[in-house]
């Protein structure tokens, strides 16, 4: 049996929460390997809604081990609050069920302060950050001044490292005209929560190696989407981590051989939160209808999502750069009732047709989509659980998507409910 790695193939918000929850019933271990609490996954289980940001989606399933890998940047206060929130919904969480990488980098108040100050200073040139300190925390990690989970166990080292780190960030805050922070206050606040965080600390790479050796099935859960990847996305309107499947190895401390089948979660239309290029965006009644029917508001930010037609050229590029073997197509039911449906097959740039999203920021802003049109379907696809229940128009649409992106549809989701899923191929036995 194979492991499975799940990543988003668009700009995030593709419905990963539901698919990961659906897959977690077949897995033994569920691992988050990048991002931070800027991510948001919504699970609907037997009518109960769970909103997760740092916790892996497997946390709501009894008998599963949930792992937060070293590639995740962790706000310790947000993590403890999320644990409390989920516990209040009846979920049992303990050090036996939740493992936090001891070498994961911690997000501190100075990170969110700098994040917000820089975004405000950009004015009209804002990049759409959630202002939760994700980027500055990754910067500190790469600059080798970051605070890690294991540092909470050594008061002297923590105080020394914290002093240097806050000195750096206060210089930035002062330059931006923002209020500076007191390192002693941050140190005291960290000491208050250190025991609660350290009880979950674990040698994650070793835990995962032992699970693999024991024949356990591991599900690696990515956050956001490939077009927000810091290398392969629409830079600079991206997140601060790599989202491609290869990051599962680096961000969890495993061999690349353990990544297994890579499933790209893909919405049947396209959405984006915040600033940045969006060739198929529909700033009209169509976009409004997609947003209303799809309930397109961010799980983390609450911001209204920009909506548009499916971009096959963009997804095809994500499949190549992200290492995706097959896709889970979500929210097909949102397209029910449209008289005409369009798919972007490529772009026009300076009078020439191209088949990919260029790296240049200026070129991305000037792209014009090239569309292929389909007759819509009147019948409902909502809640369908077999291929035979889908109307002919919907089947034609799905088949054309497969042709244009160059990858099979492995799973098809027709509502937020976990069981409203059509399985074409089992990802855990695909390799």
Image (tube, rainbow, N blue to C red):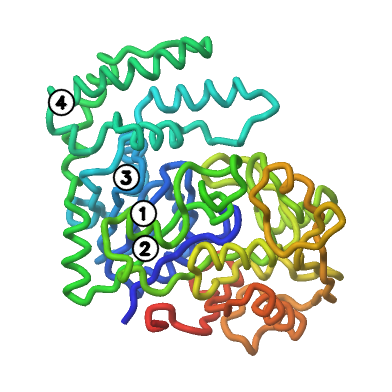
Decide if residue 29 is on the left or right side of residue 118: left
| Quarter of the picture holding the C terminus | bottom left
The image quadrant of residue 194 is: top left
Q: Which mark is residue 157?
A: 4
The Cα–Cα distance between marks 3 and 2, rounded to whole angstroms, is 20 Å
Viewer-nearest residue: 39 or 168: 168
Q: Are marks 1 and 2 in contact (CB under 8 Å)?
A: yes
**Which circle's residue, 2 or 4, is located before the other in the chain?**
4
| Crowdedness near tag 2: few (<14), some (14–19) or many (≥20) residues, C-alpha within 10 Å | many
Residue 68 % position (x, y): 30, 51
Element carrying mark 2:
strand
Q: Are marks 3 and 2 in contact (CB under 8 Å)?
A: no
Q: Which residue is mark 1?
A: 33
Q: Which residue is mark 3?
A: 83
Residue 257 % position (x, y): 31, 71
The Cα–Cα distance between marks 2 and 4, rounded to whole angstroms, is 32 Å
- Please determine whether, in this image, residue 346 is positioned above or below residue 226: below
Element carrying mark 1:
loop
């Amino acid at each position: 049996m194979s492991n499975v790695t799940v990543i988003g193939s668009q700009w995030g918000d593709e419905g990963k929460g539901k698919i990961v929850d659906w897959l977690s019933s077949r897995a033994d271990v569920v691992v988050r390997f990048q991002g931070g609490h800027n991510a948001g996954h919504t699970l609907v289980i037997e009518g109960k809604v769970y909103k997760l940001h740092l916790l892996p989606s497997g946390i709501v399933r009894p008998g599963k081990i949930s792992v937060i890998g070293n590639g995740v940047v962790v706000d310790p206060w947000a993590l403890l609050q999320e644990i409390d929130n989920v516990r209040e919904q009846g979920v049992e969480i303990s050090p036996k069920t939740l493992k936090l990488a001891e070498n994961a980098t911690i997000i501190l108040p100075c990170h969110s302060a700098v994040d917000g100050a820089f975004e405000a200073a950009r004015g009209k040139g804002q990049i759409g950050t959630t202002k939760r300190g994700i980027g500055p925390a990754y910067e500190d990690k790469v600059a080798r001044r970051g605070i890690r989970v294991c540092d909470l166990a050594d008061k002297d080292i923590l105080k020394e490292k914290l002093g240097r780190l806050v000195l750096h960030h206060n210089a930035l805050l002062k330059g931006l005209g923002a209020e500076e922070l007191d390192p002693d206050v941050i140190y005291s606040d960290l000491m208050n929560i250190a025991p609660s965080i350290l009880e979950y600390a674990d040698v994650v790479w070793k835990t995962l190696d032992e699970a693999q050796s024991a024949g356990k099935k591991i599900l690696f859960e990515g956050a956001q989407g490939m077009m927000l990847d810091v290398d392969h996305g629409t830079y600079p309107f991206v997140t601060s981590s790599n989202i491609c499947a290869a990051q599962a190895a680096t961000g969890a401390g495993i061999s690349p051989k353990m990544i297994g089948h890579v499933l790209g979660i893909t919405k049947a239309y396209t959405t984006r939160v915040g600033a940045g290029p969006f060739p198929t965006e529909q700033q009209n009644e169509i976009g409004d209808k997609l947003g209303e029917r799809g309930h397109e508001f961010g799980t983390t930010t609450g911001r209204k999502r920009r909506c548009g037609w499916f971009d096959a050229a963009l997804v095809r590029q994500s499949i190549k750069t992200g290492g995706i073997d097959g896709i889970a197509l979500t929210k097909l039911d949102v397209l029910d009732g449209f008289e005409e449906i369009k798919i972007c097959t490529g772009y026009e740039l300076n009078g020439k047709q191209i088949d990919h999203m260029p790296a240049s920021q200026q070129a991305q802003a000037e792209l014009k989509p090239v569309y292929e049109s389909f007759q819509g379907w009147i019948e409902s696809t909502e809640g369908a659980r077999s291929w035979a229940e889908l109307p002919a128009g919907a089947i034609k649409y799905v088949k054309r998507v497969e042709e244009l992106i160059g990858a099979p549809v492995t799973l098809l989701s027709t509502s937020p409910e976990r069981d409203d899923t059509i399985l074409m191929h089992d990802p855990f036995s695909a390799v």
